[in-house]
Amino acid sequence: MEEQIVFSDECYDELRQMREKVNLIMEYSVDAFAHGEREHMQDILDLEDEIDEMERAFQKNHVERLSRNECTAAAGLVFSDVLSGLERVADHATNIGYSMMDAQDEDEN
């Protein structure tokens, strides 16, 4: 904001889509952690795959926007960093879900 970097509407839309998926995987993972439930474990795994695919597609889309001069290099760096950061959050959420499964499996043995 301080550098007044402007994103295209397409960038904002892709970041919104990614944020919504990451929020959902976080919600499911925190719920699993807080309540020890496996109800959404398949959803977590599916979302992780979907988020990984979204990151790849959105990074590719952004390179195409850069090549068409629809976006600046500065905006491209910020977009890429935010996208990668969101994907890492999803990875951590998935790890939380897995840890709950592992803990429950150990309790059952």
Image (cartoon, rainbow, N blue to C red):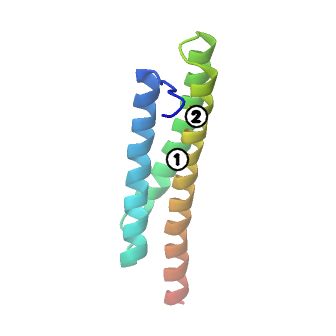
- To which quarter of the image does residue 38 belong? bottom left
Kindly identify the residue that appears in the image at 49 percent across and 56 percent down.
45
Residue at coordinates 55% horizontally, 23% vertically from top-left?
61
Tell me where residue 41 appears, x and y as whole percent.
Answer: 43, 63
Q: Residue 78 carries which label?
A: 2
Left or right: 81 with respect to 1? right
Determine whether 75 is above or below 37 in the image. above
Q: Is residue 65 above or below residue 109?
A: above
Q: Which residue is drawn at 38% across and 76% down?
A: 34
The answer to whether residue 102 is visible is yes
Left or right of 42? Residue 86 is right
For mark 1, does the 10 Å Cα neighbourhood hold few (<14), some (14 to 19), or many (20 or more) residues? many
Direction from residue 13 to residue 2 in the image, left or right: right
In front of the other: 105 or 63: 63
Looking at numbered disc 2 in the image, what kind of residue is underneath it? Val
The residue lying furthest to the top in this view is: 68
User: At 57% from the left edge and 26% from the top edge, which residue is drawn?
Assistant: 75
Labelled disc at residue 44: none
Image quarter hosting the C terminus: bottom right
Q: Position of residue 97 (x, y in %)?
A: 49, 67
Q: Tally the numbered discs.
A: 2
Say which of 97 and 68 sits in front.
Answer: 68
Query: Gap between marks 1 and 2, in whole Å?
Result: 12 Å
Q: Position of residue 104 (x, y in %)?
A: 49, 81
- Mark 1, residue position: 86
Say which amino acid is labelled 1. Answer: Leu
Q: Is mark 2 on a helix, strand or loop?
A: helix
Give yes or no for contact between labels 1 and 2 (Cβ–Cβ under 8 Å): no
Helix, strand or loop status at disc 1: helix
Looking at the image, can residue 38 be seen? no
The foreground one among 22 and 102 is 22
In primary-sequence order, the first of circles 1 and 2 is 2
